[in-house]
Structure formats: structure tokens, C-alpha cells
Image: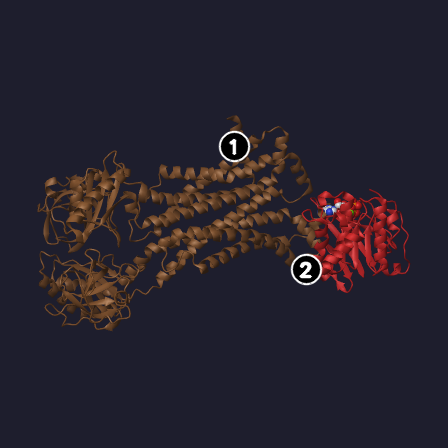
Amino acid sequence: MIQLRNIERLYKTGAGATFVLRRINLEIRQGDFVTVMGPSGAGKSTLLSILGMLDDAWTGEYHFLDHAVHKLDRKKRADLNRQYIGFVFQSYHLLDNLTVYENLDVPLSYRNIGRAQRASMVAEALDRFQIVGKKDLYPSQLSGGQQQLVGVARAVVGNPKLILADEPTGNLHSSQAKDIMELFKRLNDQGTTIVQVTHSEVNAAYGNRTIQLFDGWITNEPKNPEVAAGKQPIAAIGAQPQG
Amino acid sequence: METFLQDVRYGVRMLRKSPGFTAVAVLTLALGVGANTAIFSIVDAVALRLPFQNPKQMVGIENSYSDSGLTPSSFADFVDWREQNHSFAQLVASFRSSFNFTGGREPERIQGTYISQDYFGLFGARPLVGRAFLPAEHKKGAAGVCLLSENFWRHEFASDPGVLGRALALDGAAYTVVGIMPAGTPDFHAPPYSELWIPLEAKPPYDAHGTNYLQVIGRLKPGTTRESALQEIKAIQERINVQFPPNKHDVDIQPLTDVLLGDTQPVLQVLLAAVGLILLIACANVANLLLARGTGRAKEFAVREALGAKPWRIVQQSLTESALLALAALLAAVLLTRWVTQLFLGFWPQNLRQPDVVLDWRVAGFAALVSLIAVMLFGLAPAVLASRSNLNLAMKEGSRQTTGSTSHGRLRAIFVVSEMALALVLVIASLLTLRSFNRLLHTDPGFNPGRLLTARIALPDNRYSEAAGQRFFQDLLDRISILPGVQSAAAAAYVPLGNGGQTGDFEVEGRFSQTGGGPFAEEHFVTLNYFQTMQIALLRGRAFAETDRQRMPKVVMINDYMARQLWPGENPIGKRIQVLSAPNDWSEVIGVVADVKAAGLNAPPAMQIYLPTLQHPISDMFVVVRAATDPETLVPAIKRAVFDIDSQQPVSNIALMDELMVRSRSGSRSSTFLLAIFAGLAMLLAGVGIYAVMAYTVGQRAHEIGIRMALGAADWDIHKMVLGMALRMGAWGLGIGLLAALVVTRFLQTLLFGITATDAVTFALSAVLLGGAALFASYIPARRATKVHPMVALRYE
Ligand SMILES: Nc1ncnc2c1ncn2[C@@H]1O[C@H](COP(=O)(O)OP(=O)(O)OP(=O)(O)O)[C@@H](O)[C@H]1O
Ligand SMILES: [Mg+2]
């Protein structure tokens, strides 16, 4: 589904430029449940935003399904994002002036789905995350954990083929975190590809594969992705979460 | 005092820190203040800055007839009013006329004014050289004397003091020069300016009751009110009416300023209202800018409050900054006013006295006053809101990157909505006048104005008998017709659009007549070839012929409108009417011609009677010449033809009919163009307002937009969102504006021609125009919104 070749990302800073991602080679197959781990500042969120086509300022090759993303313009990338991807932001990013219900409706409203169908999809998501009672509240009236729940719900409401989740359980009670992970697992079993960032070994265990990022480098994936293709899951190397 | 200075210092620093904001705010305000000041300076020059003492005591007296509104006064009435009243310290009359002046380089027709006794005394005007008229010189039959204008004295006599005591030949009679009046002597008649003055009473041009031609002005005695003076003059007029029932009429007294403003008054009122609206729009704009900035500074204010500042200190600080803005705007406006006034005067109607605009402390004072009002208008709301921004909220908002507080947002929306509404009123007003003017441009004057030359030849009565005058014009027209380049030539007592004319009542044979109140019609005395030369269409019957001469049956032609009014559905040919108050002298209607817009292109339809000069000789006529080529080239030949017959006879009022058409429209043209400029300005300001608010909103909501894009919003979705916000504000503004315009444009009706003040097409068109401008203004921020990168959503982590 996804092939990354020599992806590099650098931020221009005052003096010069610092690399956040270096020579990233990665293959993710349809149906994978990949966990990205690594210390704070390693580039995990950056990698996810590239996968999610939210970032454009990278170099290298990125193949998504049969699209050569590196050759696409902003608009085409946005189309792919809209069509296939659900994104859970590290800091939720709910829309302050919309209710929970409306927040869930936003991604659907951008996806050419009929009003009635949207209503039933939102209702289903509210139900699935047990937040029906909160549907008319504004984000400011929710706790941090509840906001995160809504953020996850918003990512999955449109039944995307690929879910990119940046620390989806960071603020959640462990039982809630478990619920989310179980949900991801179920979705994954039904064929949804998932890439999650987490600092939790427990969460990582739900995945079938873990990638370690350190200072912008992938430290455990073999240089040649073809080689790695056969032996999954790969055990974590030096997997002591930091930060 | 110290805190004030501190506020000023701080305010200056704040304004310098955001030069873009400051420039836009100052320029917007300067436009508002400048436009107001410019219009004020013109009103000041036209109506307020009168060149004499106590203008409040001065009034104009006019006749009022039940069916024809206000008219000037007759000499007979004036004399009675003057002799019998106790209300006026002085009561004077004047009549602008023109005279054949011979004895200069070439015979000339010059502007002169008949003035009654004490005329200049009333205005406190004194001769520069020589003396004023003596009371004896105002006695009936006194020897001719005259006063000259400084201008005429200079260019005709090279300012030679020796001209005093010399006799000038005016219309063939001798008038001894007794003095020179300085430039700037009060002259309340339409341009051109008077070159000389002669006593009215010595030889009034007309003295019959009912011949109304005098402008009567009086100065009320101290303690007398306008109302009591009116009652007294009314009482005097009642007595006159008993003696002369055919000319029964009422009188009216108005402040002199109203009399002088005349037709200009509604125009100036509309323009004043327009610039008032502009100022409001400008204030709303600046208030909006301040609010937007205020939101950004909510934290600063909150910190100040946390440090112990009382709320009123923050209001004071805020107002100080507003006042600084207004001060800068005032300075810019002073520079602008000069230029705007120049622009206005460039559009000044040609048929009105050009006001003598002086930009002095009064005008500057007015500008300062307007600026002060502006500060109150735009400075207060943001200041009060700033004082209310509470610490907690501001800190929280600052940290959470939400959109500005909702109260600010709502207030901004209200300002934009009112801006749109005000702008729409102006746009509608302007579009109404534009469309009315367009109708005026395309009005059919009833004749063909192309390549038509007119010139006035006024034969003085004392040198020409009726028969001699008739021979003169016969001879002249014969000579002109055979000039190369002339297609056809004729003459008439007055030409259409030539600012002159005569009306009179008439009676229809077999119909009951009421004395003094009969219908009025324009009376046009014309020579044989007139209709052919003017190319006025003959609709029925025949035109005048050689055989319609004196001692033959009297004949008249009438216009279509009159035919329809008097004989609807009947054939008017062969009917008889009685004209010129000649009892038992019936004239037969022999032809009907098309309506001619004689009194002005926007004049309402009028009954018109044409009388042949063969039966009613006239010694003061305009020749009209239809040229085959450029009519201007004919002028020397026509002058020569006149001088060949009579070397003492001047040719005056030489004009192309095309020019007269332009002049006739020039009043409407001025108001139309000025309103269009103001409406354009209003649209620009409203557009800037919408743009500023939308740009600000987009900036504030960049984060939200980024999230939406990350969630899959396409460019179009973002466009829709931003334009939708603008459209909602716009729709409110347009709705309110339409309602307001329905009420307001009614005051415009007097300036409109051929279009009602609530014309639906104009309203719709204006709304579309302004709506389009608003949409365009918000399109740029909307486009910028789509350039927000989804990454900004992630950056806030
Ligand atoms: N806008 C930016 N400008 C400059 N440097 C940036 C920017 N955004 C991120 N970085 C840098 O890129 C590096 C990687 O950031 P990223 O957010 O991908 O880390 P992360 O692995 O997600 O960390 P965390 O676990 O704390 O979320 C960091 O060192 C960060 O300082
Ligand atoms: Mg991160």
C-alpha cells in the first residue's frame, strides 16, 4: 500500500537546516498494523504527517497504492487524503466552535456523502465510542480524555482505508485506551491499515510490526525493505520508550 | 496631564509600530473628513459666507400663484410694498438685463442690472471711485446715469478715472457714468456677472401689474420676525388684489439664503447627506480596524489591568490613540479638501454662480469638528470593549488560539453590516441619478440640435420702429440664407434651452373663462422658416405662410401636448383661442407641431403656442442658422451681415445649440458625477471594510482552516465557508440598506428625471453591484484561506 524511498525532511532553522527524517525506506502493506515508536523529537509526528499527505516539504519517493505521491501536486494529495485516510492528531484539534456531533460530521461533509447517510454514520460512531450523551457539547466542555476520544472517533467515522493515529491514547485511562486499541484491532481485522505512534509497549503489542525512529533514522528496519517483507512481526530493538 | 502625555507618547509608538494599519485608518478617515469639509466649504461659500452684515435679517419676497408656484415680482407690486410696509428697514428690487453698448471697439451686448433705490446700501457696498446713485436719480424720468463694474472699467476703459462724467450709449440712449463698483460687489443673478447698474425707478423696463420680473430683497427691522413681515406684506397684497383682480396672487417670504440657493439647495442637501454617509462608513471601517487590533491586544490590556490599571484608564488610553488617528486624518484631510473642492468646482453647473470658495479657519474648524465626531463614533466602542476584556478570558484565549472573543466578532459584523447598508443607500442614490441623467442625455428635445447656431440681435426700441425692426430681420435673414454653408435661417423671440422665454394665459373660444386664473402656455414668436430650420416636426395642419400677415386673420400653431390637453380626441385645426390678453381678437389654430423642450431638457411637458412675427413683430430676436458644415465658421459672416445693415448693432449670445444642450444638462451632470464619485468611494470603503474583516477572520481562523483541510476539506469547501460568512453579513447589509433606501431616496425625487425614486430595477442593480463588490473583496481572503497549509494545524502541537 505504501512505499517510502529515501524520504528526507529538513526544517530550516535560523542558522542552517536540521534533518528531522533521514533516508526513510519503509513498506507498509494493506492490512498492516504498524506501530511507530521512538523518543520525543525523533520525527514520529513528522513521518505521520508525510504519510497523511499533510506535509509537502519532503524529498524522496512515496508510493501510495498506485499513485506516485512525490509527483502529485497539493490538490491531488489532498484528494488521496480525503479518499483513504483518517488522521488522529496528537493534540486532538477539535473545532472549538462546533459541537461533538458537528465535529464528527466535518470530515463526512467533505466527502460527497448524502445527508441521511452522514447522520447514520455519525450516530454509529457516537454509539461506538459511547459519547452519545456528549454529542451536543462543545470541546471546551469536555475533559482532555473525552476530547481525545472524539478525535479518534472523528478519524474513523468515515471508514477510511488507512488510519494514522498520533498517540491516540496519550490522555486516556488505561481501560479507555484498551477499548480504543481493541477497536483498532477489530478495524484492522476487517482490513483497515493502521499506523499508530505510541510510547506504550502495551499499545504496540496490538500491532503486527513496530518501527523504531531515532533522531530521524529508522533503526530497526533493514536497509532493503524487500528483505524485511517476509519476517513479521519484527521484534523491537532497544525499545525503551523515552520522553 | 502627565498621564495624558504618557498616553500620547505611548499612542504614537503604537501607531508607528503598525504603519499599515495606521496608513489605512488615516487615509479612510481623511477621505471621510475631506469630503465633508469640501462640501461644507462650498455650502459655506454659496450660502453662509454672504458679503454683507447680518444675513439672517435678509429675506426674499416672491409672488406665489395658485397654479404656477413662485415667481419674481412686478414693479407695481414692489412700489406698493415698499411704500406701505413697516416691517423692513430697506426693501430693494433688481432686474438683470442686457444692453447694446456702442462706442467701444465693436458694438457689444453687455450684462447690466436695474437696481432700485438704496440697493447697494442694503448690502453695504460702496463705489470704488465716484459716487452711488442720488435719490433724485431714482425718480421717474430722471436723466440716465450708470455705475460700472471694476472689471468692465478695466478692460473697456483701461481703468481711466476720466470715464466719470462721460456718457455711455446703452441701447442707443445716453447714461452718464457716476461711479465704479469694486470687484466682489454682491450679484445674486445667474452668471455672467453684471458689468453695469442703472436706476430702476427712472425708467423701469416694465411697470404693469402682472409683469413679474423683479428680484425683491429686504432687510427686516430689528425685532421684526419673518412671519410678521409676511403677514404685513400679505395684507398689502390683499389690497392690491382688490384693485387689480386679473393679477390676483399671494406672496411668500423666504430667508435670503434659500432664495440664493434656489435649485442648488436640494443638490447641496443631497451631497451633504452623501458625504455624511461616507463619514459614517469611514468611521465604521476604522472602528473595525481598531476592534481587530484590540482583539490582538486583549492580552496587553488584561496585563495592564492585572498591574492595577483602572478600566477608565484603559478607555482613556484607547481614546487617546483614536484621537491621534483623527488628528493625523485631519491633517491629511486638509490637504485632501483643497483637491476635492477643486474637483467639485470642476463639475460646477455652468448656469450657476461659481462659488468663491475660501479655505479658512471656519472650514478648518468644521473639519476639526467632523474629526471630533468621528473619534466619538469610531473610538468609543473599541475602547469600552477593551476595558471590559477580562484577564482570565484574555489569557485563556491567548493560549488557546481560538477566534477572537465573540462579542468583538459580533460587533465587527454589525459594523460591516451597517457599512454595507449605508453604502447601498449611496449606490442606489447614485445609480438613480445616473440613470436619470442617462434619460436626460437621450431625451428628444423636439428639434435637431446638430449644426445649429443661435445669436441674439436686440434692436433698441428708440432706434427701430416696429416696421423698421421687421424690415431689419427680413433683410438679415435674406442675407444669411444665401451665405455659403448655410442651409436655412430663421428667427424667434427666444430659443429653446436659451434660458429665456415668455408665458401667458389664453382663452379658448366657447369655453368659460376665469379672470386671472386661465391656463398658461409658453408663447413662441417665430419667423416663417422657423420649423423648417429647427426641424421641428409638423404633425397636423400647416405651418405659417407669407399670407399670414398683419390685417389678415390671426393664426397660431400649437404643440402636440396642448392639442391633447385642450381637445383630446378632437381635431384642433380650425379651433380658435385668444392670446396676449387681447380681448375679442381670436386666432385660429392652423397647425400642430411636436413638443419642444424649451425651458430645459428636464422640464415637464408644457403647452406651447407659436405666433408668427409677421402678425406680431418682435424687435429682440435670436436668429437660428442651420449650417451645412461647421456652424462656428459662419460666425464672422453673420456678424458682418448684421454690421452691413446697422454698424451700431451688436450680436450677442452666440451659441451652438449643442452647447446649450450641454449647459442645460450641466446641473444634473454635476450632481450625477459627484454622487457617482461618492457612491464609488462608499463602495470602495465598504469593500475595504469587508476585506479587512474577512482577512482578519481568515488570519484568526488559520488554525481551524488547517484542521479542516487535514480532515479533507477541498479548496472549494474553504471558499464556501469564507464567502458564506461574507455573504451572510452582506445579505444583512443589503437587506437593511434596501429598506433604508426606500425611505431615503424619496428626498431625491426633485433631482430625478424620468425615473421614480423607488425604481425597482435600480434597487436590484445596486444590490447586485454592491453584493458583487463585497464578494470580490472577500474573494481575496477566501483565496488566501485555501493557501493555508494543513501543516499549520500540526504546528500548534
Ligand atoms: N515547524 C518546525 N520547525 C522547526 N523544527 C520543527 C518543526 N516541527 C518539528 N520540528 C522539529 O522536528 C523534530 C521532530 O518533530 P516531531 O514532532 O516529528 O517529533 P515527535 O517524534 O513526534 O516527538 P513527540 O514524541 O514529542 O511528539 C523535533 O526536533 C522538532 O523540534
Ligand atoms: Mg509527535
Q: Within the image, what quadrant is residue B592 found in?
A: bottom left
* Image point (66%, 44%), residue name: B402
Q: Residue A75 carries which label?
A: 2
Q: In the figure, the brown chain has which letter?
A: B
In-image side of B168 versus B394 (left or right): left
Secondary structure of residue under mark 2? helix
Chain letter of the residue carrying label 2? A
Does A59 appear above or below B400? below
Q: How far apart are marks 1 and 2 (CA)?
A: 50 Å
Q: In the figure, the red chain has which letter?
A: A
Q: Can residue B24 be seen in this view?
A: no
Q: Which amino acid does label 2 sit on?
A: Lys
Q: Where is residue B358 in the image (x, y as percent from the top left)?
A: 33, 42
Q: Within the image, what quadrant is residue B460 found in?
A: bottom left
In-image side of B125 versus B421 (left or right): left
CB at disc 1 and ligand 1 closer than 8 Å: no
Does B467 appear above or below B677? below
